[in-house]
Image (spheres, rainbow, N blue to C red):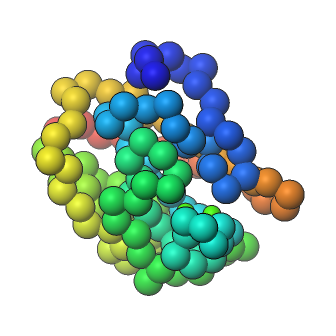
Amino acid sequence: MDHDDTSYLGNDGGYLGFSGGFDGTSWAVELDTYENAAWDESENHVALLQDDYANALASSSTVPEMEDAGELLVEVWFDAGAIEVYVDGTLTIEYALESYPESFLLGFTGATGGSTNAHDVDDLYVSCF
Ligand SMILES: [Ca+2]
Ligand SMILES: [Ca+2]
């Protein structure tokens, strides 16, 4: 996978657009409201994934209800490999990456399979220190 290629589209449905082809240097924070029994821990979970929808480095179901919840404030903090994910002020994921590239692309993906759902990103704020 060429990480400079901004045209990458992963598979839809439970794959959440983040399905394989990566080489150990791609991560995703998922907000997942559909339980795919083969790889999900619940129908309402947040996870930090590496390279693939089914490779969770950390996952938590101790999160606010996200399905039909209206607006959610999601914060992803990244500091020298230390990642914290908050959903409406609740710390859901804490994980320290052993290594990561000096530069990377930031993106979003959303997916549904046989169901219909809306995924909106609003008021995005990205800051580097
Ligand atoms: Ca799922
Ligand atoms: Ca999942």
Q: Is residue 33 visible?
A: no
Q: Which quarter of the figure is the C terminus placed in?
A: top left
Q: Position of residue 42 (x, y in %)?
A: 57, 78
**Looking at the picture, how far across and down is residue 49, in whole percent?**
41, 53
Residue located farthest toward the front when viewing the structure as drawn: 38
Say if residue 43 shows up in the picture. yes
Q: Residue at x 50, y 31 (%)?
A: 21
Which of the 4 quarters of the picture holds residue 43? bottom right
Relative placement, left or right, of 105 versus 31 is: left
Q: Nearer the viewer, residue 106 or 23?
A: 23
Side (left or right) of 15 relative to 4:
right
Q: Is residue 94 above or below residue 20?
A: below
**In this view of the protein, which residue sits in the foreground, 98 or 102?**
98
Instruction: Please report the residue visible at 23 percent of the width from the left and 61 percent of the height from the top.
Output: 95
Q: Is residue 68 above or below residue 5?
A: below
Q: Position of residue 41 (x, y in %)?
A: 52, 76
**Residue 61, relative to residue 2: is it above or below?**
below
Q: Quadrant of ligand 1?
A: bottom right
Q: Is residue 103 left or right of residue 16?
A: left
Q: Is residue 14 above or below residue 105?
A: below
Residue drawn at the location 50% of the way across and 56% of the way down: 54
Image position of 70 (left or right of 115): left
